Amino acid sequence: MTSLNPLKNKTKRFRFRHSTAGWFAAVLLTVAGHPVTSCPAQESRADEPGAQVLTRGPVHEAFAEVISYDSVPGVVVTAKPPALIEEIPPGERPEGDDVTWIPGYWAWDDERNDFLWISGIWRAMPPGREWITGYWAETTAGYQWTSGYWADVTTTETTYLPAPPKSVEEGPNIDAPSRNHSWTPGSWMWSADRYAWSPGYWAEGRADWDWIPAHYVWTRRGYVFVNGYWDHSVERRGVLFAPVYFDRGVYDRPGYSYSPNIAIDLGLFAAHLFLRPRYDHYYFGDYYEPRYRESGYYSCHSYQSSRRGYDPIYAHRRWEHRDDRDWERGIERDYQHRRDDESARPPRTWAAQRLMDGGKGDGRRNRSMLATSFDQMSKRKDSSIRYQSVDSDDRKQLARRGQEVQKSREQRRDLETKDADGLREGGKIKANKVPSSRSPIATKPGNDKKGAGSPPEPQRAPKPEQKSTSKTNPKGKPQQENERERPSTGDKGRDNKSDEPQAPKAKPQPERERPSMNDKGRDKKADEPQTPKARPQPERERPSTNDKGRDKKADEPQTPKARPQQEPGRPSTSDKGRDKKADQPQAPKAKPQPERERPPMNDKGRDKKADEPQAPKAKPQPERERPSTNDKGRDRKANEPQAPKSRPQPEPGQPSTGDKGKDKKDDEEAKGKKKKKVEG
């Protein structure tokens, strides 16, 4: 008779449908590997009592990695982090073979003095990279955070290094080749068991790609070097979900799980972005109050100008607006406006934003609505990202992903914390290598192949300077400093080896210093037998006497010998050449020649035949190095008749006969005068 009771039949049909729907939901969750207590309604999780969805807070470090010039140890807290929450990824994800789910983790909130949950993310992975998960580790002072990083997937071992020196990066030191170039900062490179500085450089920017420069990540075992790589621009990186603050009684329940459903609008995300290098995280949202700057929060526009690090996201935005000269000033004006006007700041929680959404336009006029429902986001027609459903097989695999990531996290923690103190020598970490274990979050082989959507060629940084870190130029230009110092070293080498065949290398010095040295030599030798040689000035008036001497003894080689007297001291060789061949440029050539070759024999005669007092003339010559050896030769053969034999030589050796001729010339002049008187 049930057919006669339509209301009863309707009630039974409703109960059947309701129980069938509940049974189907339970089966689906069981197949996905989650407890039945998990709620499949993702949106309801945002409004669940005890779970406060935040529209500000730390950014998942796999989504945006902070680049600090001087990496420091992670923050230490006294509270023990809770056990990880079982996190279910949403039922839709962005399209793409390189998109994967990266689970969330606990982060310390010093304002609440408690932990908050950084939700998992859908991430389009950087080509050729694998994610090394961060972790909390117990220390004697409490619990310390060690950051994750994107490692090169091709590496087979991880090298842990001593702390690099303080960065000397100071920004561009030359103008950009074009407006299409962006500055990439320099970094220290480990080479030959020491650090060498690799300077910054200009490189062309690329649309849709951010260059992540080389940097270091601190661990308790040592510093890990991460080479530079291309990453997707922020709008193409995937989906960033809002962080959540849970009451402890919520996630402590057995079988509890959480599925994020409130996403951050990436179109507005970068306009409210801050960096906190002490905590090694980006932060988004309302951190405009002046007290946050005192706590180590830096707005994106001021982070790089503070010389603390490099912000790839801000650098790419600046490159995109390279034709707008007022863009950076506009960013600073917006920051100052929100700092001074509280009503211009974005809301801090999802609940506050929803209240504002329901209000009038006046309530949200100056505010940015950073959060949105993921269900609504995935259905947008104007979005540049297309979404696809996650089938049951993928959900099973992603359900196991959390366990695999946790296992990888524990392996890394054990490796980097156990026996870390035993790797120290003199209080410093020794360089050490260990085999790399593959991360469960890694790009697939060949997904970075050439073609549409492929990354540009990696940037080529300048080769590091092979220079001791203790002598590094604080301006980051060690090579230029070396080049400035080299000439002085070369001059020292010439001075130290004056008696070796390097004499020709000293030519530039005599050429520059010869006039001063000759003058000094004349002054120094004025009280010595060279005083007679001071006659050269009167000798300029003797042309008639010289001519007489030539007429009387034209067949004697003494006439040319008298000419060198026109110049005092040893430099007479050049003047002698000038008198003999005034129209020829050989006189300057004769100067270096005596220094290299013949002067040793010729000058021997000069010094020794100057009544032996000319031996002291050789003493100042060590100032020019090479002549000193020549003077030694002069002293040896002062009494030998061979010196006159060298007189006729028109070569640079003639100065010696010239000097000898000076003494004979004096006798000739005296005899000439006496004879003239007799004839008169």
Image (cartoon, rainbow, N blue to C red):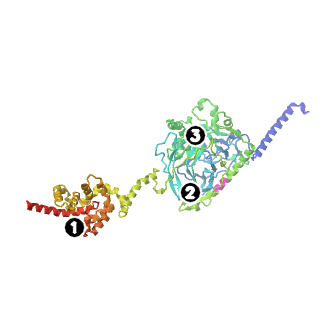
* Image marks 2 and 3: residues in contact by CB distance under 8 Å: no
Residue placed farthest to the right in the image? 1
Q: Does residue 535 lie above or below 310 as drawn?
A: below
Pick out the residue farthest to the front: 555
**C-alpha gap between disc 3 and disc 1:** 88 Å
**Residue at x 66%, y 39% (from the top left corner):** 262
Dot 1 or dot 2: first in sequence order is 2
The residue under label 2 is 161
Q: Is residue 607 left or right of residue 457?
A: left
| Rendered image quadrant of residue 376 | top right
Quadrant occupied by the C terminus = bottom left
The CA distance from mark 2 to mark 3 is: 34 Å
Single out the mark in the foreground, 2 or 3.
3
The front one of 294 and 102 is 102
Residue holding disc 3: 207
Residue 165 coordinates in the image, percent (x, y): 50, 54
Q: Which residue is mark 1?
A: 611
Task: Specify the quadrant of the image occupied by residue 599.
Answer: bottom left
Image-based side of 117 in relation to 501, left or right: right
In reply to whether residue 621 is colored magenta, the answer given is: no
Other residues around mark 2 within 10 Å, as few (<14) / some (14–19) / many (≥20): many
From which residue to which does the magenta span run?
Answer: 408-413
Name which residue lies at 64% across and 35% down: 383
Residue 497 percent location from the top left of the image = 37, 63
Q: How far across and how far down the image is residue 261, in percent?
A: 68, 40
Q: Nearer the viewer, residue 636 or 134?
A: 636
